[in-house]
């Protein structure tokens, strides 16, 4: 049975190692904040962080995260020390980025990973880091603005 | 401002009817005249005896001070929840943090769309427009009752009691009370027969930004979409659909599928074969193992190229007359110069981020449904007919929708019905009565049909010797969306589906001889309204053709439009505002070496909202296109929430731009060629232009903003491309059109 760290908790879900992490999270562990959008790594709705790096959970077999640290939207802003994710989520609220909201868990995780790596991303860097995250509501303008706003708050 | 009671509508104090639990406080119901007598449990809309009673109301004030607004419209991203709550909060003088929104149950006797008659549903950019009076009335009535309760308690005249930010006070004595402290007393009072609505200059919410009420749960992952709903003992179903429209199952071999651990059942339903399992991945694995033989005797086997060829042939022949001013044929014949152009628009999928899905549970007295419900009344009817129930036995819980763009308001209740059919097929077996969640994969969603119809347009125009447009002849060819739907009676007249020609038949320009004709060929490809419906194609052909005429006549495109819009001041005002803010007429900053830049304008009205956009584009040396900036001006009447209007303009432009640049569903021998986001490309962040929104100040009643920005972007961009390159794009999407210098 595959064991990994999920949002700071050790889990050993009852699922075969070739089941995609997305469906393990959603259907076996009950964490539905991670979304299904395409199933083949084209949209980013299923983005989670694996050892801090954005990954498409729809094409990540459970077995591949054995022993890893997985962070989902539910695990963001959990710790006091997690300034980046708090700043990102606050900026998302302040600017009312969301529309339907379905893509936003993935957008937020991608933004958090970007800001952890780059404190002052340029427009081109934002576009590069989030080009894999589709938003059919086209909230992109506010996503860019919110990332910059969060960067400003983080100083 | 004294507003008379709404026509045929009464506000009822539901808390006095005794069907609320103690402690709930004040509940107001706004009902169509006569229906009030039917309010109450046991008579309306209860299917499962075990389900908690949900009071049918628009406003509920709890003894804890919470103000709950019951939204009759689906929140699918467009901001309806915050908008509807704003209307109530305004007249109630509530404080925004105390306001909550709950989705209304399906019950057209209370929650009908006032623009749709006796039907409940969301669409046509009507959520705010049809609720504007209704919800302000509800808020004002609740406020008056809180005031009366306070006046009674304090023994002071009601006229001396004021309300602000959720606090009721009597300034002369300094007494104060919260809504929660007064709710129970207010609930015992009669509803005022007439309510006084605010003078617009006293608005505190309307016209200002009110933060979205769903930003929190949609930012921390807690918002529950249909896809996320988990019910005890719930099963998940995937359906194998036929590869061609019109095909059916002949036979299937489910042995391998049933052998997958966790599969509960495999059942035939009218639309295919359903695999029902413990979860998505199990159902998907099992579905892949199905062996199905399809009966394709009645299958549709044409390809897009053949459909287009047939439509072009039709476009050369006269069609049903949608509009005729003067004598366009004679004026064309007599014109000094003539122009013609043919346009092609492909089928388009909505491709909402959340693929279609629906949860259904059959119970003893009926059926309960959970989904992002957009057309409750039609869904109730369709499901009731399939299950042998009365419509009121179909209870629908409206959840957030992960986008829709029209898709979830399906005229045939397609995916909702499919979910109900699965539940029905399980009814005789060991899994009877378990909730079933139907989930479509992205591929299922993309290939299921219900597309924006494919259209071909043919335009001809004539200029006189001065370069003035004297003749305009517009022929459209495409499937009717409304034929055969319950909307046909009202919206299909003399063979003209108004949604096929809207925007073309309503062309605002002063052209003396103007004809619009329509062919509505019947094909078995299912078609449906898609964000802004007919305007998705009519705005494009009319606004790009007009632009072409302007350059042929040597006129400035803004100036020509202004002159032709003398009788249409709202069109003209948005055009002038957009042109001014975009600094129309000033030179564009040059691009890098090898890049060509251009600016283009388009104006269009849809859903009574007037929109003008100026797009700035760059055509790179390799012929690829980048939209740099869009300045949008719009007049949507009174602006309820300017920030949400801007969000809808940004999103509407992005959605329209995705279709303009990349969007096409094509058929090859009847099979849909696209399947996922690699071949039906959405807009990505690096393609999103900088969008500026400018709202025309207006005191007219509010109109919709969810759709009207969408159809204007493609022609604005095409006109900018023409300005940059001289090339006129007449086929959508632009992808694949050669723009190389
Ligand atoms: S669902 Fe994983 S990338 Fe789309
Ligand atoms: S907010 Fe709807 S898909 Fe992004």
Image (spheres, coloured by chain):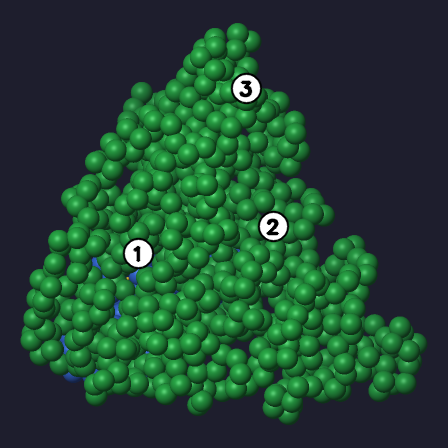
Point 59% across, 32% down: residue? B575
Decide if ligand 1 comes within 8 Å of the CB at mark 1.
yes
Point 48% across, 11% down: residue? B335
The chain to which mark 1 is attached is: A
Instruction: Name the N-terminal-most of marks 3 and 2.
Output: 3
Answer with left or right where residue B126 lies relative to residue B297. right
Is label 3 in a helix, a strand or a loop?
A: loop
- The location of residue B435, given as percent across then percent down, is 32, 81
Please, which residue is most extreme toward the right here? B172
- The location of residue B451, given as percent across then percent down, is 33, 49
Judging by the rendered image, the residue that carries numbered circle 1 is A43
Judging by the rendered image, the residue that carries numbered circle 2 is B703
- Please name the color used to draw chain B: green
Decide if ligand 2 comes within 8 Å of the CB at mark 3.
no
Is residue B169 or residue B109 the one in the foreground?
A: B109
- Please name the color used to draw chain A: blue
Which of discs 1 and 3 lies nearer the camera? The answer is: 3
Quarter of the figure with residue B1: bottom right
Answer with left or right where residue B484 lies relative to residue B649. left
Labels 1 and 3 within one chain: no
């Amino acid at each position: 049975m595959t064991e990994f760290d999920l949002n700071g908790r050790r889990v050993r879900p009852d699922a075969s190692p070739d089941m995609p992490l997305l469906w393990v999270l959603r259907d076996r562990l009950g964490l539905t904040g991670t979304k299904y959008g395409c199933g083949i790594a084209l949209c980013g709705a299923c983005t989670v962080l694996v050892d801090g790096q954005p990954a498409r959970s729809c094409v990540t077999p459970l077995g591949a995260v054995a022993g890893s640290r997985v962070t989902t939207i539910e695990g963001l802003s959990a710790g006091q020390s997690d300034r980046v994710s708090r700043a990102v989520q606050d900026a998302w609220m302040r600017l009312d980025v969301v529309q339907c909201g379905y893509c936003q868990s993935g957008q937020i995780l991608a933004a958090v990973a970007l800001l952890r790596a780059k404190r002052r991303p340029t427009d081109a860097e934002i576009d590069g880091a989030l080009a894999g995250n589709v938003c059919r509501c086209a909230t992109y303008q506010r996503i860019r603005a919110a990332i910059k706003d969060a960067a400003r708050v983080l100083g | 401002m004294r507003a008379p009671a709404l026509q045929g509508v009464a506000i009822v104090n539901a808390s006095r009817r005794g069907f609320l639990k103690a402690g709930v406080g004040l509940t107001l119901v706004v009902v169509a005249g006569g229906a009030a007598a039917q309010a109450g449990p046991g008579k309306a809309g209860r299917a499962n005896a075990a389900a908690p009673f949900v009071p049918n109301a628009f406003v509920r004030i709890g003894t804890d001070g919470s103000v709950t607004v019951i939204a009759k419209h689906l929140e699918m991203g467009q901001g309806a929840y915050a908008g509807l709550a704003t209307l109530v909060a305004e007249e109630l003088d509530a404080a925004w943090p105390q306001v909550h929104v709950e989705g209304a149950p399906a019950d057209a006797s209370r929650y009908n769309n006032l623009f749709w008659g006796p039907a409940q549903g969301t669409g046509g950019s009507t959520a705010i427009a049809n609720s504007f009076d209704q919800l302000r009335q509800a808020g004002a009535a609740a406020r008056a009752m809180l005031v009366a309760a306070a006046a009674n308690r304090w023994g002071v005249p009601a006229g001396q009691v004021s309300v602000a930010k959720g606090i009721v006070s009597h300034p002369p004595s300094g007494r104060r009370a919260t809504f929660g402290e007064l709710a129970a007393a207010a609930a015992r009072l009669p509803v005022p027969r007439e309510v006084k609505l605010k003078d617009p200059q006293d608005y505190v919410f309307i016209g200002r930004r009110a933060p979205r009420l769903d930003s929190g749960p949609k930012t921390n992952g807690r918002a529950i979409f249909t896809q996320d709903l988990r019910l005890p003992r719930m099963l998940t179903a995937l359906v194998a659909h036929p590869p061609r429209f019109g095909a059916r199952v002949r036979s299937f071999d489910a042995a391998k599928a049933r052998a997958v651990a966790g599969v509960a059942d495999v059942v035939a339903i009218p639309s295919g074969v359903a695999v029902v399992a413990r979860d998505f991945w199990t159902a998907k694995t099992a579905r892949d193992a199905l062996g199905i033989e399809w009966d394709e005797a009645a299958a549709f086997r044409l390809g897009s190229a053949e459909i287009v060829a047939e439509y072009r042939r039709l476009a050369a022949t006269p069609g049903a007359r949608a509009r005729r001013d003067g004598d366009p044929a004679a004026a064309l014949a007599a014109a000094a110069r003539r122009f013609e152009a043919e346009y092609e628009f492909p089928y388009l999928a909505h491709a909402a981020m959340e693929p279609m899905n629906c949860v259904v549970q059959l119970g003893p007295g009926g059926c309960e449904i959970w989904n992002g419900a957009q057309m409750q009344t039609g869904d109730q009817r369709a499901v009731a007919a399939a299950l042998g129930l009365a419509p009121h036995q179909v209870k629908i819980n409206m959840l957030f929708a992960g986008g829709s763009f029209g898709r979830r308001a399906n005229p045939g209740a397609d995916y909702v019905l499919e979910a109900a059919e699965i539940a029905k097929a399980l009814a005789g077996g060991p899994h009877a009565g378990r909730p079933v969640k139907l989930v479509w994969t992205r591929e299922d969603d993309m290939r299921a049909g219900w597309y924006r119809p494919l259209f071909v347009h043919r335009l001809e125009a004539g200029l006189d010797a001065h370069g003035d447009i004297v003749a305009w002849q517009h022929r459209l060819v495409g499937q009717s969306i409304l034929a055969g739907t319950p909307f046909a009676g009202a919206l299909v007249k003399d063979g003209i589906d108004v949604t096929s020609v809207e925007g073309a038949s309503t062309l605002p320009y002063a052209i003396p001889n103007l004809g619009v004709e329509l062919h509505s060929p019947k094909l078995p490809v299912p078609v449906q309204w898609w964000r802004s419906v007919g305007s998705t194609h009519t705005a494009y052909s009319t606004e790009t053709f007009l632009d072409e005429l302007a350059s042929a006549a040597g006129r400035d495109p803004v100036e020509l439009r202004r002159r032709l819009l003398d009788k249409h001041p709202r069109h003209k005002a948005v055009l002038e505002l957009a042109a001014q803010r975009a600094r129309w007429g000033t030179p564009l900053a040059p691009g890098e070496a090898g890049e060509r830049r251009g600016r283009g304008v388009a104006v269009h009205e849809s859903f009574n909202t007037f929109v003008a956009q100026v797009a700035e584009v760059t055509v790179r040396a390799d012929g690829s296109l980048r939209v740099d900036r869009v300045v949008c001006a719009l007049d949507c009447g009174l602006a309820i929430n300017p920030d949400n209007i801007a969000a809808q303009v940004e999103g509407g432009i992005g959605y329209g731009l995705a279709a303009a640049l990349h969007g096409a569903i094509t058929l090859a021998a009847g099979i849909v060629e696209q399947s996922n986001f690699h071949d039906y490309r959405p807009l990505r962040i690096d393609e999103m232009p900088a969008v500026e929104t400018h709202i025309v100040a207006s005191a007219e009643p509010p109109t919709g903003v969810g759709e009207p920005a969408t159809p204007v972007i493609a022609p604005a961009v095409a006109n900018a491309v023409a300005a940059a390159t001289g090339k006129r794009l007449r086929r959508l999407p632009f992808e694949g059109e050669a723009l190389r210098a």
